[in-house]
Amino acid sequence: MALAQAQAAQADTLGTLILSIDYSVKATPEDKSPDGILPWVSIAETDSEIKRLIDPDEIVLPYTKARLIIDYPLNNPAIFELSAEGKGFTRKQLIQYIGDKYHMIYEEEEQSAATKTIPLKERDGLINRNSTDGKYGVWGHDLSDLSLTTVEVYRDDKGQISLILDINS
């Protein structure tokens, strides 16, 4: 999915895969998960999902600077420079950054697009989000459709750390 596309498109520039960070949350009774765990975090609901996050305070990225690449579902990928104090990023800090950046992208897209998002209630047939022509060119999915399962961490020859997201929809 998004991870495979990013890996193929950027294999030469990302460097070597050095780490995979998995995300999961404690299931609610409504989730009906047999093991009590859901192997993803909702991007739209990161603030509430953090309360159920497994190992939120674990330092999962032992670097203080990283480049976050968001390319799904965007025609124009977004790159953000992230900084952490101390020994690196905790699982909670990373999902907060990721959620905040996705919310910002979708807000900027709506503000900058001439073609606006068709409201869910007005969509016919397949209810996927229509493509918009704003700054990022969001296509196919509303923010509420997106869930993070894994963050892939790469290091290039210069030591640059890049984060690629495995987003499910």
Image (cartoon, rainbow, N blue to C red):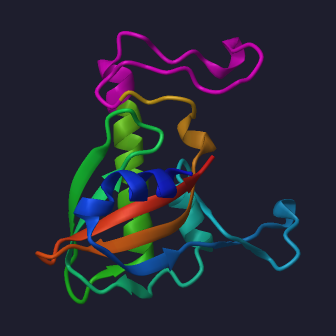
Residue 24 position, x and y percent, is: 62, 72
**74 relative to 129, above or below:** below
> Residue at left 19%, top 80%?
85
Of 104 and 29, nearer the camera is 104
Of 76 and 85, nearer the camera is 76
Direction from residue 168 to residue 151 in the image, left or right: left
Per the rendered image, the range of residues in magenta is 108-136
> Residue at left 41%, top 36%?
74
Residue 75 position, x and y percent, is: 38, 32
In reply to whether residue 133 is colored magenta, the answer given is yes
**142 relative to 159, above or below:** above
Direction from residue 148 to residue 33 in the image, left or right: right
Q: Principal SS element in the magenta part? A: loop
Residue 98 position, x and y percent, is: 39, 57
Residue 107 position, x and y percent, is: 37, 32
> Residue at left 54%, top 85%?
55
Of 102 and 47, nearer the camera is 102
Image quadrant assignment for residue 11: bottom left
> Residue at left 29%, top 20%?
112
Image quadrant assignment for residue 113: top left
The number of callouts visible is 0
In reply to whether residue 78 is colored magenta, the answer given is no
**166 relative to 21, above or below:** above
**110 relative to 72, above or below:** above
